[in-house]
Amino acid sequence: MPGGGVALIRAQAALKNSQSAGRSSWVFRLSAKVEEPLRTIAENAGIEGRW
C-alpha cells in the first residue's frame, strides 16, 4: 500500500502541470512546501543531494 510520500509525489506532479498553465505565483510557493517533506523522506531513505 502506498504511503504519504506517494501522495506528495503525485501532488508535486500536478502542481508542475498547473505551473505550466500559468498559475505560477501560488503554485511555486505551494510546490516548495510540498517538496520539504519529500526531501526529508529521501534523506531518511539515504538519498543525498538535490534530486
Image (cartoon, rainbow, N blue to C red):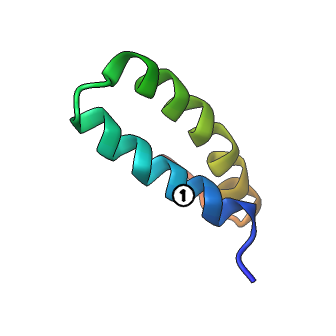
Give how far across and how far down residue 21 sits, in percent. 23, 35
Q: Position of residue 17 (x, y in %)?
A: 31, 46
Residue 7 falls in image quadrant: bottom right
Relative to 21, is 26 on the left or the right? right
The mark total stands at 1
Q: Residue furthest top?
A: 25
Q: Is residue 26 visible?
A: yes
Residue drawn at the location 32% of the way across and 23% of the way down: 24
Q: Is residue 47 left or right of residue 16?
A: right
- The residue closer to the viewer here, 23 or 33, is 23
Q: What element does badge 1 sit on?
A: helix
Which one is nearer the viewer's eye here, 5 or 18?
18
Q: Is residue 26 above or below residue 19?
A: above
Q: Which residue is mark 1?
A: 9
Residue 23 drawn at (x, y percent): 32, 24
* Viewer-side residue, 47 vs 20: 20
Residue placed furthest toward the bottom? 1
Point 64% across, 38% down: residue = 36
Say if residue 51 shows up in the picture. Answer: no
Q: Is 6 placed left or right of 31 in the picture?
A: right
For label 1, the crowd category at 10 Å Cα-Cα, with few meaning under 14, some 14 to 19 and many 20 or more, is some
**Residue 4 drawn above or below residue 40:** below
Q: Amino acid at mark 1?
A: Ile
Residue at 75% across, 83% down: 1
32 to 13, vertically: above or below: above
- Which image quadrant is residue 19 in? top left
